[in-house]
Amino acid sequence: MSSLSLTGRRQVLADLVPGTLVRDLTLVAGGALLTGAAAQLVIPVPGSPVPMTGQTFAALLVGASLGMRRGAASMLLYLLVGAAGVPWFQGATSGLSGASAGYIVGFVFAGALVGALARRGGDRTPLRMVGTMVAGNVVIYAFGVPWLMAATGFDLATAFDKGVTPFLIGDALKTVVAAGVLPLAWAAVSHLGKED
């Protein structure tokens, strides 16, 4: 039995950290903090009420690293604490109003999906990680675009033009980075496991 298997199912990176409940709570809180920190990297997008931030990248990496339950819990914590008034959404904002809030709601579901895909090996190779990141981004857009439409009165074409199209190049770059980072982490873990 491989040291990287857990009762017949694949591990995610968080499973390699020893511990139980305390570990899980720390990882969930840490993932939320990482996402909040990444949200402070804000690049305004001309013509769009939604800025480009690092939080989407962080949310998807957190989901893939923590797995479905912890990834979703981490993003739910991020959502709830920000909605309650902690200013850790984009550009030190809080609350669930405005054009961007639907994307943040989508993080919870995207975190669960990419975590589930990672549990099935979606984080082990660059090609699989690309698919995992694309699936996560689709989920985020599935929540973000309708919310954007409701918040602004945009029709679907305009919401897509202002809430998806300007972000595709950035999403592609983030996907390329993630496609290198997580498979590289697994390669390093495998290498260390062979040295033991």
Image: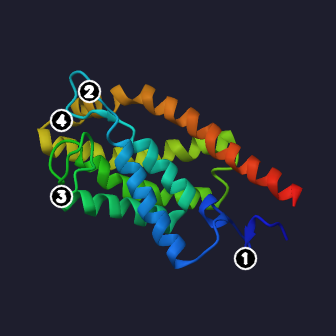
As drawn, is 179 to the left or to the right of 96? right
Q: Earlier in the sequence, mark 2 or mark 3?
A: 2
In front: mark 1 or mark 2? Answer: 2
Q: Secondary structure at mark 1?
A: loop
- Give, as a three-letter code, the residue at label 3: Gly
In the displayed structure, would residue 183 be above or below residue 112?
above
As drawn, is 86 to the left or to the right of 14? left
Q: Are marks 4 and 2 in contact (CB under 8 Å)?
A: no
- Give, as a three-letter code, the residue at label 2: Pro
The label number, if any, that marks residue 44 in the structure image: 2
- Within-10-Å neighbours for mark 1: few <14, some 14–19, many 20+: few
- Give, as a three-letter code, the residue at label 1: Thr
The label number, if any, that marks residue 85 in the structure image: 3
- 3D distance between C-alphas at marks 4 and 3: 30 Å
- 3D distance between C-alphas at marks 4 and 1: 48 Å
Q: Quadrant of residue 91?
A: top left
- Nearer to me, 146 or 120: 120
**Residue marked by disc 4:** 155
- Nearer to me, 185 or 131: 185
- 3D distance between C-alphas at marks 2 and 3: 22 Å
Residue situated furthest right in the rendering:
195
| x and y percentages locating residue 13 in the rendered image | 63, 58
- 3D distance between C-alphas at marks 1 and 2: 46 Å
| x and y percentages locating residue 39 in the rendered image | 33, 42
**Residue marked by disc 1:** 7
Q: Residue at x 63, y 46 (%)?
A: 182
